[in-house]
């Protein structure tokens, strides 16, 4: 198990890289997609909203950059 390191300290010491995971596979994807759809339906998200798959692609790109 990784020790808890505050995000700012982790970013400054370089240990954030080993902990950066934005996306999870398996059933987590469908759970997140359903939750995202509920937030859209409820009006929880205030700005213009991108499709869930586009959001996931953006997060995947961020994850790759964070871990390189």
Image: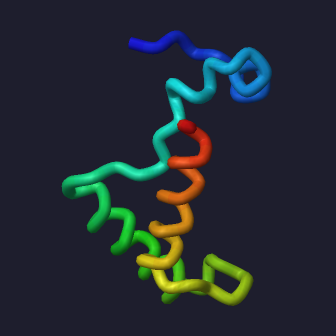
Residue at point 20%, 54% (across, down): 26
Which quadrant would residue 8 be assigned to in this image?
A: top right
Pick out the residue farthest to the front: 68
The C terminus appears in which quarter of the rendering? Answer: top right
Q: Position of residue 54 (x, y in %)?
A: 49, 78
The N terminus appears in which quarter of the rendering? Answer: top left
Q: Closer to the camera, 59 or 52?
A: 59
Say how many tags the image has. Answer: 0
- Examine the rendered structure and indicate whether residue 33 appears above or below residue 43: above
- Examine the rendered structure and indicate whether residue 21 appears above or below residue 40: above
Which quadrant would residue 61 be assigned to in this image?
A: bottom right
Classify residue 55 as left or right of residue 31.
right
Residue at point 54%, 37% (across, down): 67
Classify residue 58 as left or right of residue 7.
left
Q: How is the image coloured?
A: rainbow
Q: Position of residue 45 (x, y in %)?
A: 64, 78
- Examine the rendered structure and indicate whether residue 1 appears above or below residue 63: above
Q: Closer to the camera, 42 or 61?
A: 61
Q: Position of residue 39 (x, y in %)?
A: 52, 77
Residue at point 73%, 84% (across, down): 47
Residue at point 73%, 27% (across, down): 11
Classify residue 41 as left or right of residue 44.
left
């Amino acid at each position: 198990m990784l020790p808890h390191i505050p995000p700012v300290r982790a970013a400054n010491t370089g240990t954030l890289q080993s902990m950066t995971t934005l996306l999870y596979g398996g059933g987590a994807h469908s759970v997140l997609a359903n939750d995202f759809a509920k937030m859209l339906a409820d009006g929880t998200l205030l700005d213009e909203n991108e499709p869930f798959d586009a959001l996931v692609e953006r997060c995947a790109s961020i994850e790759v950059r964070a871990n390189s």
